[in-house]
Image: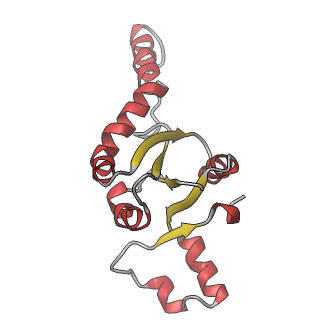
């Protein structure tokens, strides 16, 4: 039985918004994997042209883009959410992904151990709901009181 719940986050997503849904579907013995975009704090670049300051800035940027330090930042940022799930007997992990989130999800789901994907619904999903008759045109423009979330079975992603 597959027991892995994948929670991909976009750059501006907050885990607190998705936690009620993850808590609702996760059971003791399952594992929730939070996928966080790399670099965790966004992209930075050097503003120095040449000289010693450019070298020092390069060293700071190398430390900033270090994969392990970004993984630690992501873990620290998600620690409160992970503690809530751990208290309920749900194992947690943090993974970084670089590049396209959809491709990262497909690669993770292709391994075959993903049971469910919990993701925030974007405008594309809202328009698809309009075309399939699941929502109205008015629903596109109103701001819901809750965050729309998709629960996706991995077989629909691959």
Position of residue 63 measured from the top left corner of the image (x, y, whole percent): 42, 20
Snapshot quadrant of residue 144 = bottom left
Q: Is residue 121 above or below residue 49?
A: below
User: Vertically, is 93 above or below 133?
Assistant: above
Residue 46 in sight here: no
Query: Residue at left 50%, top 38%?
Result: 38
Q: Is residue 140 above or below residue 156?
A: below
Question: For the point 36% across and 35% down, which residue is it?
Answer: 73
Q: Residue at x 66, y 86 (%)?
A: 131
Residue at the outermost right position: 158
Residue beneath the point at 46% across and 49% down: 31
Give the camera-side residue of 46 and 112. 112
Instruction: Say above or below: 68 vs 141.
Output: above
Viewer-proximal residue, 37 or 48? 37
Q: Position of residue 68 (x, y in %)?
A: 45, 26
User: Could you tell me which quadrant the N terminus lies in?
Assistant: bottom right
Q: Is residue 135 visible?
A: yes
Residue 25: x %, y % from top left:
44, 66
How is this picture coloured? secondary structure
> Picture coordinates of residue 147 (x, y %)?
39, 72
Q: Which residue in the rendered view is the most extreme toward the top? A: 52
- For the C terminus, the quadrant is bottom right
């Amino acid at each position: 039985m597959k027991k892995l719940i994948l929670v991909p986050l976009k750059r501006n997503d907050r885990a607190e918004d998705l936690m009620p849904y993850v808590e609702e579907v996760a059971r003791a013995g399952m594992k929730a994997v939070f996928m966080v975009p790399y670099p965790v704090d966004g992209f930075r670049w050097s503003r120095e042209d040449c000289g010693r300051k450019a070298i020092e800035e390069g060293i700071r940027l190398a430390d900033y883009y270090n994969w392990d330090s970004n993984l630690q930042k992501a873990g620290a940022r998600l620690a409160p959410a992970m503690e809530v799930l751990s208290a309920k007997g749900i194992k947690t992990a943090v993974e970084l992904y670089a590049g396209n989130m959809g491709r990262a999800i497909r690669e993770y789901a292709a391994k075959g151990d993903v049971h469910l994907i919990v993701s925030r619904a974007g405008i594309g999903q809202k328009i698809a709901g309009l075309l399939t008759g699941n929502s109205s045109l008015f629903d596109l423009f109103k701001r819901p009181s809750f965050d729309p979330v998709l629960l996706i079975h991995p077989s629909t992603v691959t």
